[in-house]
Amino acid sequence: MAPDREGLGIIDHGLVACRDGRIAYAGSVDDAPGDLDALEIVDCERRWITPGLIDCHTHLVYAGDRAQEFEQRLNGASYEDIARAGGGIMSTVRATRAASEDELLRASLPRVTALLAEGVTLIEIKSGYGLDLASEAKMLRVARRVADMLPVEVCTTFLGAHALPPEYAGRADAYIDMLCAEMLPALAAQGLVDAVDAFCERIGFSHGQTARVFDVARRLGLPVKLHAEQLSDQGGAGLVAQYGGLSADHLEWLTPEGVAAMARAGTVAVLLPGAYYFLRETKLPPLASLRDAGVPIALATDCNPGTSPLTSLLLAMNLACTLWRLTPLEALRGVTVEAARALGRTDAGMLAPGRRADFALWDIARPADLAYAIGANPCRGVVNAGVWRAPRIDA
């Protein structure tokens, strides 16, 4: 599928054929091989087909909510003020630690279901609201169970270096010691971790502490990513690029040096417009610099209770276009091929032979419509690993 003038690879009167959960052919009906012996044919009635959407940065396994903090911010408190007063992430940690695994699962499933209704087929889910071995393991098991119960693939990310738990108050280095020596190796040994993340920020962990976590991830053969330059410039983008990281996420305070480091390493910029909007931020991510350097740009919901209670990837696309002037093409690439790259997934994000047969069917006039309408959901069907799931066009 050669790119058209919009860079989308549009095929008119196209065909997607699936076999054993993979795409066997994607292209024009006229060019299809003659040996495609279909067991079932679905006429999509000239609707648009795109790759399944990918939400490559979420924290959607958690208990409780933080609506009170939303009100506090509207009354003048900053995110950092709330965090330093014992709210913020620690509020969610307390609720998540107290919840049973089944309670966490019940709370999480509606959030995932909302994303699936909009054509999402692959989701990343982070831990980071447990901050002890038992609670982090509980969160990651719930993330795995989500994939067992719903038609979606889940990539898990260990975010133990998210905040300092109360039992380690004033002892951040001791907490990182425990995380590196005990928590991360144990969770990796249980097969619960696909990647490792950290929060490198003034209210999170230092450059040096983050590097120690990444060193352990490297020894365990796990890829890394980083919450970087959200509230200040801590040099996080350069650090994660130094480790060949999959992505640096947020990036409002990203410097030219960080952009250059990411470009050299092939590290994806994951932009999170939901948090920018919800926190009423004003510092724009350096889009022009990222474009000029050729850094891939992905988008995600950052679904979490404190800074982005967002379960609509379509709305995230609209916010990115409206607030930051991404083009609709950049937004669509950001939730498909570039989002797959941010997860290290070479088998997703494109309609091409050999890729996972994950795609969505849309009632739209043109691809830009996906980023255009606020609150609309034109999804008319989803195929996940070659299997139709509701809604379906002939239902």
Image: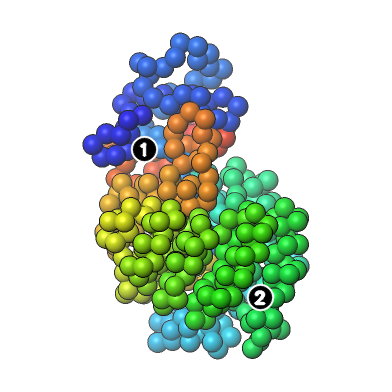
**Image vertical order of residue 45 relative to residue 34, above or below:** below
Q: Residue at x 26, y 40 (%)?
A: 6
Is residue 18 or residue 250 the one in the foreground?
250
The label nearer to you, 2 versus 1, is 2
**What coloring was used for the rendering?**
rainbow
**Image vertical order of residue 230 relative to residue 45, above or below:** below
Residue 62 at x, y percent in the picture: 62, 66
The mark that comes first in sequence, 2 or 1, is 2
Residue 55 at x, y percent in the picture: 49, 52
Is residue 256 or residue 281 the one in the foreground?
256
**Image vertical order of residue 218 relative to residue 393, above or below:** below
What kind of residue is marked 1?
Asp
Q: Residue at x 56, y 17 (%)?
A: 39
- Residue denoted by label 1: 363
Examine the image and state in which quarter residue 171 appears: bottom right
Q: Residue at x 48, y 52 (%)?
A: 342
Q: Residue at x 44, y 37 (%)?
A: 350
CA–CA distance in space, label 2 to label 1: 49 Å
Would residue 218 be seen by someone viewing this image from the given angle?
yes
- Residue denoted by label 2: 176
| Neighbours of disc 1 within 10 Å: few (<14), some (14-19), many (20+) | many
Examine the image and state in which quarter residue 297 appears: bottom left
Would residue 315 be seen by someone viewing this image from the given angle?
no
Q: Quadrant of the N terminus?
A: top left
- Considering every residue shown, the one lying at the far top of the view is 34
Is residue 288 or residue 299 the one in the foreground?
288
